Image: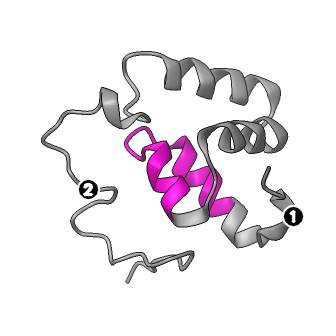
Amino acid sequence: MININQFTDRELDRIIEMAWEDRTPFEALQFQFGLPEKEVIKLMRAYLKESSFKRWRKRVNSGVSQKHLMKRNPEITRFKCSRQRGISGNKISKRY
């Protein structure tokens, strides 16, 4: 089990932002932050309002979200937008 307190506020904000995005798969969160899907769900439950969490879970479990690589179009082979700067480890890319 991962300790959520190990993350800075900025990292928590980034994790929540990435989890909220439909096109960012859980595997990208695990790669960048070491958080498996179950831990991301726990984090979202803890940091979102109940109604926001329920809306997020409903969207993730619907056919609309691409949070699971198996549900994604096989032509999508990257975790990030082609215009986004590279992300290495836990470092957050900056927009210009």
Residue farthest to the left? 75
Predominant secondary structure, magenta span: helix
The tag on residue 5 is 1
Specify the amino acid type for callout 1. Answer: Asn
| Span highlighted in magenta in the image | 13-31
**Residue 50: quarter of image:** top right
Name the spot of residue 83 as percent of width and height, x first. 24, 69
**Residue 74: quarter of image:** top left
Q: Determine whether, in the image, residue 43 is placed left or right of residue 28.
A: right
Specify the amino acid type for callout 2. Answer: Arg
**Residue 22: quarter of image:** top left
- Residue at (42%, 47%) from the top-left corner? 24
Label 2, secondary structure: give it: loop
- Residue at (41%, 34%) from the top-left corner? 68
Front position in the image: 65 or 90: 90
Front position in the image: 34 or 21: 34
